[in-house]
Image (spheres, rainbow, N blue to C red):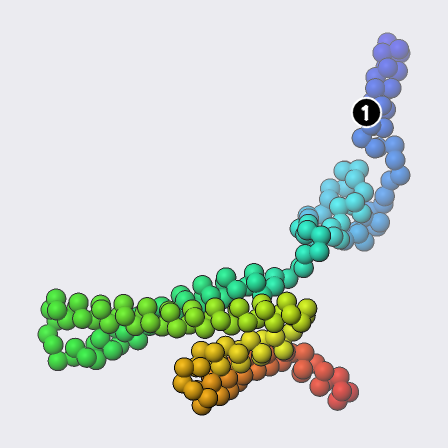
Amino acid sequence: MEGGGGSGNKTTGGLAGFFGASGAGYSHADLAGVPLTGMNPLSPYLNVDPRYLVQDTDEFILPTGANKTRGRFELAFFTIGGCCMTGAAFGAVNGLRLGLKETQNMAWSKPRNVQILNMVTRQGALWANTLGSLALLYSAFGVIIEKSRGAEDDLNTVAAGTLTGMLYKCTGGLRGVARGGLAGLTLTSLYALYNNWEHMKGSLLQQSL
């Protein structure tokens, strides 16, 4: 009987040593001060060191040489698609407005519905093509300037917007090129100012202090 009890104690001790029960213990005070990122508090009955559960590294593994943020080439697809969808939606609403205005003297009938539908389709395609072309030119110029300079900053945005406006209005002569470039420069400058507004405000506050 004593032998059986001794063997049972040995077995229990062996299992306890296998699961780490014989290791260094941690008090409740030690466990309370360890941060657990994204996990519920551990049960005091689990003999696990919480320090091994803290996630202090990135969640995703990036290829060698890859950036953590998407570049202009990756954002180009989203920009072009978003502009096309925005232009189509705006053109459809504008076409509906124009169709109702042009057919306001007509009674509700099939010819009027067809005319309104044609106006919606025509305006939607026109605006989608316009905004999509602008987004394509802007993205292409942005990628080329980024690769040429080897840097990504607001200067690329302003330069790409200016060149896009100039090229888009190049059929209108020098005056059209100047107007297009000025429009692109103004819009992209406002966009860059909006993106850096918080940083500029923080810098001004630091200088004032």
Q: Amino acid at mark 1?
A: Leu
Q: In the rendered view, would you say 65 is above or below 13?
A: below
Considering depth in this image, is 33 or 128 the residue closer to the camera?
Answer: 128
Q: Is residue 147 left or right of residue 12?
A: left
Residue 158 appears in the rendering: yes
User: Relative to 185, does residue 88 appear above or below in the rendering?
Assistant: above
- Would residue 38 be visible to someone looking at this image? no
Task: Please state which of residues 56 and 121 is positioned toward the viewer in this rendering.
Answer: 121
- Quarter occupied by residue 195: bottom right
193 over 11 or under it: above or below: below
Q: Residue 120: horizontal and vertical position, in percent?
A: 26, 70
Q: Quadrant of residue 65?
A: bottom right
Residue 199: x and y in percent read: 67, 78
Q: Name the residue located 47 percent from the left edge and 85 percent from the top edge.
A: 177
The image quadrant that residue 134 belongs to is: bottom left
Of 96 and 198, nearer the camera is 96
The quadrant of the picture occupied by the C terminus is bottom right
Q: Secondary structure at mark 1?
A: helix
Q: Position of residue 135 (x, y in %)?
A: 47, 70
Report the residue marked by disc 1: 15
Q: Dot 1, crowdedness within 10 Å: few (<14), some or many (≥20)?
A: few
Quarter containing the N terminus: top right
For the point 10% across and 74% down, the residue is 107
Q: Residue 23 location in percent, x, y?
A: 88, 35
Count all numbered tags in the image, as a single digit: 1
What residue is at 81 percent from the left and 53 percent from the top?
Answer: 33
Horizontal side of residue 11 vs 170, given as left or right: right
Q: Residue at x 63, y 78 (%)?
A: 155
